[in-house]
Amino acid sequence: MSDRRVKVLGTGSGIPAGRLTNLDLEKIVETSDEWITARTGIKERRIVAPHESAATLALQSARVALNRAAVLPSDLDVIIVATVTPEMPFPATACLLQDHLGATRAACFDLEAGCTGFVYALSVAEKYLRGGGGEKALIVGVETLSRIVDWQDRSTCVLFGDGAGAAVLGKTEEPGVLATYLGADGSGGSLLELPAGGSRIPSTAESVARRLHYIKMSGNEVFRFAVKIMEEASREVLSRTSFSVEEVDLFIPHQANIRIIHSAARRLGIAPERIFVNVHKYGNTSSASIPIALNEAWEENRIHAGDLVLLVGFGAGLTWGSALIRW
Ligand code: UT7
C-alpha cells in the first residue's frame, strides 16, 4: 500500500426538482404530517420525474463533483456507483455513467450494500487507489427509491426519497481518509428486502400481482439494529486511529430517521451542533443519503480544511460502515 493517502477533491449532488410533502402523502395513504414528523423527522422528499433515472441523477452529481475537483472525466481511473436502484440489472449504471461522461480510461462497476453503499464505495475506492489502481476515482451514491416503494404501504412509502451524491477522490500527500470500517450480517437480510426480480423469484405476472417488486421492511427491528450499530461503527473507526469522539468536528450519519440519529448521538455523547441533519428535506435516500449530506455540509460551510469528519451508515444486508476523514 502506498504511503500517500486519498483525499476528497470535490463533491456534488443531483437532486430532483419534484417535491412530495407529508401533506401530499396524506392524500395517498392513511397517514398524517404529525405522525411522519414525530416518528421520523421527515417533512418532504424529492421524487424523480418520468424522464429521470439513476443514470441522469448520477450524471448530474458527478459533473458538479468533477468540476469542483478540477478533474477531467478522462483522468478517472475507476468509477463506482453504489445503488439498490440501478438503471437496470445490467449493464452497470457505472458503465452508463462512464459513457455519458466520456471517462474512457475508467474501470466501472456498481456496488450494492444497501444504505451503506456510499461508505463501502469510499472504502473500496480508497484501497483501490492506495493499492496501485491509479490516481483518481469517482464514487456516486444514487437512488430512485420512488420506483420501488409500495405506494399502498404507509409503513414504508413515507420514508424514502430520490437523489444522488458524488465525490471525486485523488491521491495526496495530505492526510485525507484516515480509516474506514465495514461490516455485514447476512442473517438479517430478510428484515429489509425487495423479494422479486432476481433469480429466486423472477419477474412474472404473479410476482407483480403479489407486489413482490416493492420494498418490504421490519421497521422496529431495523431501528434497534441501527441505533446500536451506528454507535459501534463510529467507535470502531475511531479506535483504528488515535482520535476520540470529542475530536470529531462533524458527524454525518445516514439520514433514515431523526430518532435513530439522536439516539446514536446520545450514546456517543455528541452534541447536536456537531451532527449534520437534512432528513427533513429528503427522507431516506439510501446510498445517496451520506454523499448528499456531505455535499450539503460542504456547501453550507459546515466543513473546513483540517476538520475531522466521521461518516457512518447502516442498511439492507444488513450492512454497516464508517469512515474518518481529515478534510
Ligand atoms: O436505511 C435503513 C432503512 N430503514 C430504517 O432506518 C427504518 C428504521 N425504522 C424506523 O425508522 C421506524 O421503525 C419506522 C419509522 C419505520 C416506524 O416507526 P415506529 O415508531 O417503529 O412505529 P411502528 O412501526 O411501531 O408503528 C406504530 C404504529 C402502528 O400502529 P398500531 O399497530 O400501533 O396501531 C402502525 O400501523 O404506527 C402505525 N403506522 C403509521 N401511522 C400513520 C405505521 N406507519 C404509519 C404511517 N402513518 N405512515
Image: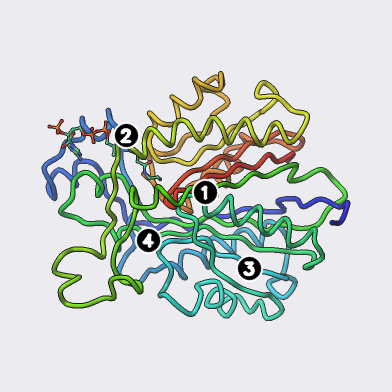
Specify the label residue 144 is tagged with. Answer: 4
Tell me, yes or no, whether the two marked residues, 1 and 4, touch with CB atoms within 8 Å: no
Q: Earlier in the sequence, mark 1 or mark 3?
A: 3
Residue at 47 percent of width and 61 percent of height: 83
**Residue that numbered label 3 is attached to:** 79
Specify the label residue 184 is tagged with. Answer: 1
Q: Earlier in the sequence, mark 3 or mark 2?
A: 2
Residue at the far front in the pictured view? 187
Q: CA distance from mark 2 to mark 4?
A: 20 Å
Ligand 1 is in which quadrant of the figure?
top left
Tell me, yes or no, whether the two marked residues, 1 and 2, touch with CB atoms within 8 Å: no
Left or right of 180? Residue 38 is: left
**Residue that numbered label 2 is attached to:** 40
Residue at 56 percent of width and 77 percent of height: 95
Q: CA distance from mark 4 to mark 3?
A: 19 Å
Name the amino acid, label 2. Answer: Thr
Mark 2 Cβ inside 8 Å of ligand 1: yes
Q: Is residue 124 above or below residue 159?
A: below
Q: Earlier in the sequence, mark 4 or mark 3?
A: 3
Residue 161 location (% of width, % of height): 35, 51
Q: Secondary structure at mark 2?
A: helix
